Image: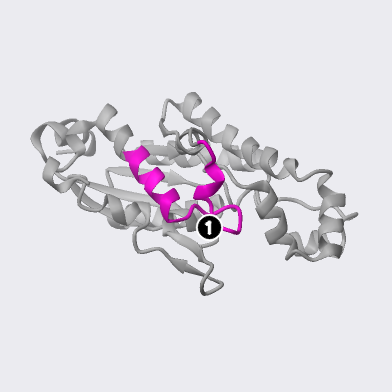
C-alpha cells in the first residue's frame, strides 16, 4: 500500500496515522514561568494535550529557537526516519525576530530579521512542495498574535537607553505587531497558493475579548490558557475536516 492509499483509507478504516509537529518554541511548549523568572516546558502544552485524541502517534520535533531554515533542514532528516502521514507546520515567530541587543547598541546600522521576508515565503513554499512530493499531508498554522507593548519591554529589558534606541529603529511599538502580521500573511498566502490546509490559530486568539491574557509576560509565547486555545482550535479543525482521524469520543477531552 503506498502513502496516498494510506491517506485515503486511514480515516475510513480506522488505521492510525503518524503525525509530526515541526515548529519552534511555541510547539515545544515553552512558556515563561513568572514565579521562577525563567522559561520552562509546559507539561500541558497543546501538543501533549492532543496526544491520545487522534488515531495514531504524534511526534513533536519542535525546537526552541527554530527558524524555518533550521526546521526545514531537520524536517528533511526526520521525515525520512519517521515517515509521517501528516506534518503540522508552525513557524514565523523567530523568523520575523531581530537581534534586539544589536539594535539597542547601534540603531542607525542596517539590521535584518533572522529570516528575510522573501526568503521566509519561498522556504515555506519549498517545505510544502517537499512534503507533498513525499506523499505527506502538510497542515499550516497561523501565528498567535503578540502583545507588542510587553514584547517591546521584554526585548529592551525595560532599560531606558535600550528602549530609546530600539524605538529609534522601529518608529513606533505598533510596528512590532505589524511586522509579525506580515509574516503571518505569508503563511496565509502560501496556504492559498498551494491549496494547503490551514488552522487559523491567530483568529482563535483574536476572537477573545482580550487576547493578551493568553500571552506570557514576554509578549510572544502563549501561556497555559493560550495552549488550550490552540489545542481547542486544532480539534475544531479536525472535527470539521477529518473527523475520522479522531480517537473514540471517550478519549477526547
Q: Is residue 134 visible?
A: no
Quarter of the view holding residue 248: top left
Q: Quadrant of the N terminus?
A: top left
Residue at which label 1 appears: 66
Relative image position of residue 133 (x, y in whole percent): 37, 37
Task: Name the residue at the front extreme.
Answer: 209
Q: Is residue 4 left or right of residue 46?
A: left
Q: Nearer the viewer, residue 124 or 81?
A: 124
Relative image position of residue 152 (x, y in whole percent): 72, 54
Which span is picked out in magenta?
Answer: 209-234
* Secondary-structure class at tag 1: loop
**Picture residue at 73% right of the left edge, 41% below the top:** 174
Relative image position of residue 89 (x, y in whole percent): 43, 44
Relative image position of residue 70 (x, y in whole percent): 53, 57
Q: Is residue 139 visible?
A: yes
Q: Nearer the viewer, residue 185 or 253?
A: 253
**Picture residue at 19% right of the left edge, 48% below the top:** 56
Residue 230 within the segment the image draws in magenta: yes
Q: Nearer the viewer, residue 234 or 209?
A: 209
Tell me if residue 44 comes above or below residue 233 in the rendering.
below
Q: Is residue 182 left or right of residue 158?
A: left
Tell me if residue 195 comes above or below residue 132 in the rendering.
above
Amino acid at each position: 500500500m503506498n502513502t496516498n492509499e494510506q491517506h485515503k483509507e486511514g480515516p475510513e478504516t480506522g488505521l492510525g496515522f503518524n503525525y509530526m509537529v515541526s515548529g519552534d518554541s511555541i510547539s515545544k511548549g515553552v512558556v515563561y514561568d513568572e514565579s521562577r523568572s525563567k522559561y520552562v516546558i509546559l507539561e500541558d502544552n497543546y501538543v501533549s494535550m492532543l496526544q491520545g485524541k487522534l488515531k495514531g502517534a504524534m511526534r513533536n520535533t519542535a525546537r526552541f529557537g527554530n527558524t524555518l531554515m533550521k526546521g526545514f533542514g531537520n524536517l528533511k532528516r526526520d521525515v525520512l526516519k519517521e515517515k509521517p502521514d501528516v506534518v503540522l507546520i508552525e513557524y514565523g515567530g523567530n523568523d520575523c525576530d531581530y537581534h534586539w541587543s544589536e539594535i539597542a547598541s547601534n540603531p542607525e546600522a542596517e539590521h535584518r530579521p533572522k529570516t528575510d521576508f522573501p526568503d521566509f515565503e519561498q522556504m515555506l513554499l519549498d517545505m510544502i512542495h517537499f512534503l507533498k512530493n513525499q506523499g505527506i499531508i502538510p497542515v499550516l498554522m497561523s501565528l498567535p498574535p503578540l502583545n507588542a507593548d510587553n514584547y517591546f519591554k521584554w526585548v529592551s529589558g525595560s532599560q531606558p537607553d535600550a528602549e530609546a534606541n530600539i524605538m529609534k529603529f522601529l518608529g513606533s511599538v505598533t510596528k512590532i505587531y505589524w511586522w509579525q502580521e506580515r509574516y503571518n500573511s505569508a503563511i496565509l498566502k502560501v496556504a492559498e497558493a498551494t491549496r494547503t490546509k490551514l488552522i487559523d490559530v491567530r483568529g482563535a486568539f483574536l476572537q477573545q475579548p482580550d487576547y493578551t491574557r493568553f500571552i506570557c509576560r514576554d509578549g510572544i509565547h502563549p501561556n497555559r490558557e493560550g495552549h488550550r486555545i490552540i489545542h481547542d482550535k486544532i480539534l475544531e479543525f479536525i472535527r470539521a475536516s477529518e473527523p475520522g482521524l479522531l480517537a473514540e469520543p471517550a478519549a477526547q477531552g
